[in-house]
Amino acid sequence: MGRTRTELKQDAKQILHANYWPAVWISIVLLFATASSTAAGGSSQTSNEFGYGHQSEFLSDYGWLFVVLAIAVVVIVAVFILLPLEFGSRSALNHMTDGTRKGRIKAAFASGNYERIVKTGFLRDLYIFLWALLFIIPGIIKTYSYYFVPYLLDDHPELSGTDVLRLSEEMTKGRKWDLFVLDLSFIFWYMLSRVTCGLAGIFYVSPYVFLTQTEAYYDFVDNGLDPLRPAGVVDTESAND
């Protein structure tokens, strides 16, 4: 990366201070959207307890059906609601960072955008899940391969979802460790969030982290790692109002 971690964080703080309440609101939506995996685990556990915690003959015979239906509902919600919310939130942060303020969360549900986001997000999460089946480390590596997918999908409307996935892999090749260390550098902030029962996370830590991640994307672009854009050039016309 061109800028140091300290510089990225300092720039993110400046954007946060200039756009505090919009950044907090967007971060709350993004936190909710990215909780889909936790929701899936919780729903599976709840369904399991519901199916086997009671001894009635009906639940004994049909408990598996409730488990399947619960999982199906979680997947549908995650793919068709949470993914657009996640990508829309990243888009809003993206254009808050580049100064255009054009990004809108609701734009993710617009015709054309919605289908593209759902397809791309589903493929991204599917590939990460399949790699995670091998072991947790491959899953983490694949997660960082797709670190910039929401931003690239927003900045390159001409690309298909699969092309966006490939471009993110190309941009992060040999640089995943830098991104991992950047995320890890917030560990004490995460501890503060936990100590304050999440209040610090909602009102400072989360928007600070998300904006720093967005700054990392622009740092990669500014250093010519996006082959589709000249170094230092930011496309401010790709966002949808």
Image: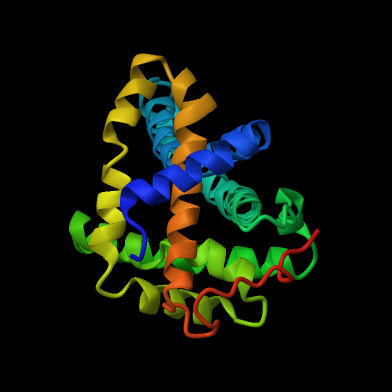
Residue 140 falls in image quadrant: bottom left
In which quadrant will I find the N terminus?
Answer: bottom left
Q: Residue at x 28, y 64 (%)?
A: 176
In which quadrant will I find the C terminus?
Answer: bottom right
Q: Residue at x 28, y 29 (%)?
A: 188
The image position of residue 120, as x and y in percent, is 55, 69
Give the vertical position of 177 relative to 25 (above or below).
Answer: below
Give the vertical position of 108 relative to 231 (above or below).
Answer: above
The image position of residue 171, as x and y in percent, is 39, 75
Q: Residue at x 34, y 21 (%)?
A: 192
Task: In this rendered view, identify the residue nearer to me: 131 or 10.
Answer: 10
Give the vertical position of 179 relative to 42 (above or below).
Answer: below
Residue 57 falls in image quadrant: top left
Q: Is residue 239 visible?
A: yes
The image position of residue 142, as x and y in percent, is 31, 65
The image position of residue 24, as x and y in percent, is 60, 33
Q: Residue at x 53, y 49 (%)?
A: 72
Q: Is residue 30 visible?
A: no
Q: How is the image coloured?
A: rainbow
Relative side of 162 to 2, left or right: right
Total numbered labels? 0
